[in-house]
Image (cartoon, grey):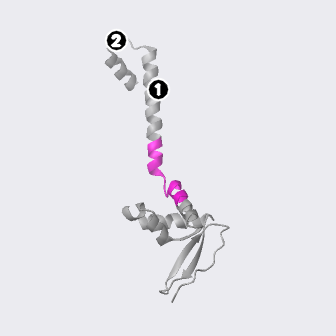
Amino acid sequence: MRIAIQIHYFEGVDWFMSLDTIERGIAISQYMRSENERVVAIFQSNVDDIDAEAVLARIRDQGGVSTSQKLRDSFNKYHNRRGGSVILREILADLVGAGRLTVRDVKAGNGAMVPHYILPGVPFDVPTTDD
């Protein structure tokens, strides 16, 4: 009703408000509510499905196998956003937990164990390191 009253006031018409003015006020308020709900949904999503799908797409682009370091290097937002590495680790853990990725640890040349994230159905041969 507040929007309808504002419309009525700006139109500067008779003392009585028309049904058309009320209907326009309702239409505007419904539009504003749906837009607000859409924006809130974007900001309230935890470990965004959009981010998870982007990570899966990037792993597909890298032949179905990737390390978290390769993924961090390929996503600028994980370098620029505070806690970006934590977010990437959470996304990878969620994808592994959901069965959308498997993980195998491979010993690197420096002796450190490096997790490799693998899409289901992709054959994985342990990479050899030159010593």
Disc 2 target residue = 13
Q: Quadrant of residue 9?
A: top left
Q: Position of residue 65 (x, y in %)?
A: 58, 70
Disc 1 target residue = 27
**Residue stretch in magenta:** 38-54
For the N terminus, give its image quadrant: top left
User: How crowded is the residue under tag 2: few (<14 C-alpha within 10 Å), some, or many (20+)?
Assistant: few
What predominant SS class does the magenta segment belong to? helix
Q: Position of residue 47 (x, y in %)?
A: 49, 58
Residue type at mark 2 is Val
Mark 2 and 1 residues: CB-CB less than 8 Å, in contact? no
Viewer-closest of 12 and 115: 115
The tag on residue 48 is none
Q: Residue at x 46, y 32 (%)?
A: 31
Horizontal arrangement in the rendering, residue 86 relative to residue 105 (left or right)? left
Q: Residue at x 46, y 26 (%)?
A: 27
Residue type at mark 1 is Ala
